Image: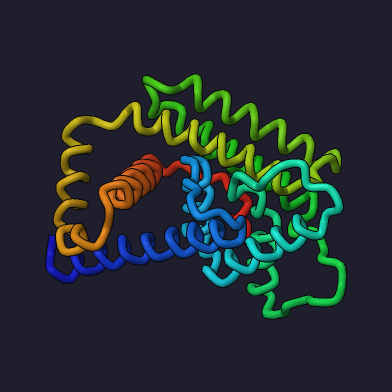
Amino acid sequence: MTPALRAAVAALFVSYFNYFTEIEDHFRRARGSGLFLLSPLDWALIETWKEAGVPLEAALKGIDRAFEKWHARKRRFRQVNSVAYCAQEVLEAARQMAEGSPQQGRKAEPAFDAAELAEYFGRNADALRESLPLFADGRRAIEQTIASLEELRAAALAGELHDFEAVEQRLTVMEERLIGAAMQSVTEDELLACRREMDRCLAVYRGKMTAEQIAVLEKQYMQRRRLEDLKLPRLSLFYML
């Protein structure tokens, strides 16, 4: 790896680290709890925001809006225990920023219409069908993901999808399953090469990060690389923006 490429990859890691920690800290403050650990699904969801180009400002703004609505409720039976609770507001904040208008003072329109959703789910299902020959192991998981995408496509065409938060949660779970299938087929040599590359890039930053933070970055990087190598689609609604 050339020095320039190594520096670029290192910068990518730092960018990821800052994005994740800013959102984690902001969510913790908005929640009003000093000690709260995000779940693996929370980390996966935040990664989809980063990968889809959702600005950090939009993510933080969406979290604030979600908690403002939660505090405005007359009855609050449960504490907010997942970043997924804020997904719909983050989605809307990102869409508004992309359009260049804050759209304050009026009711927000749905982020996507039925045709857009149906086309998106169908396109991803087709991409996964094309990838099936690549999987000796994990084929069943891919087939289940295709079936789930077809169910979402049918629901979109029928006008039955209104709760984007719930849809995003489901897509996050589906992508976790997809990543699991992709990682089953990786070879030891591929894992070793990827880990050596990460170790070189992270060497100068290890003293500034906890072991847990480094482990999260390594996991996200390896998973993303595997999806790219197999040309598998990302499933989050944020990739429609």
Q: Quadrant of the C terminus?
A: bottom right
Question: Looking at the image, is 54 positioned above or below residue 87?
Answer: below
Residue 176, given in percent of the width and then of the height, sits at 49, 36
In the picture, measured across the screen, residue 121 lies left or right of residue 18, that is right
Instruction: List the single residue furthest toward the front.
Output: 34
Q: Residue at x 21, y 45 (%)?
A: 194
Can you say which quadrant of the picture contains the N terminus? Answer: bottom left
Q: Position of residue 75 (x, y in %)?
A: 84, 48
**In the image shown, does 1 or 108 lie closer to the viewer?**
108
Q: Is residue 147 left or right of residue 189?
A: right
Kindly identify the residue that appears in the image at 63 percent across and 51 percent down: 237
One can see residue 229 in this view: no
**Does residue 30 appear in the picture of this structure?**
yes
Residue 189 spot, x, y in % from top left: 16, 34
Instruction: Compare residues 20 and 95 and report the one nearer the observer.
Output: 20
Residue 232, horizontal then vertical, whole percent: 45, 41
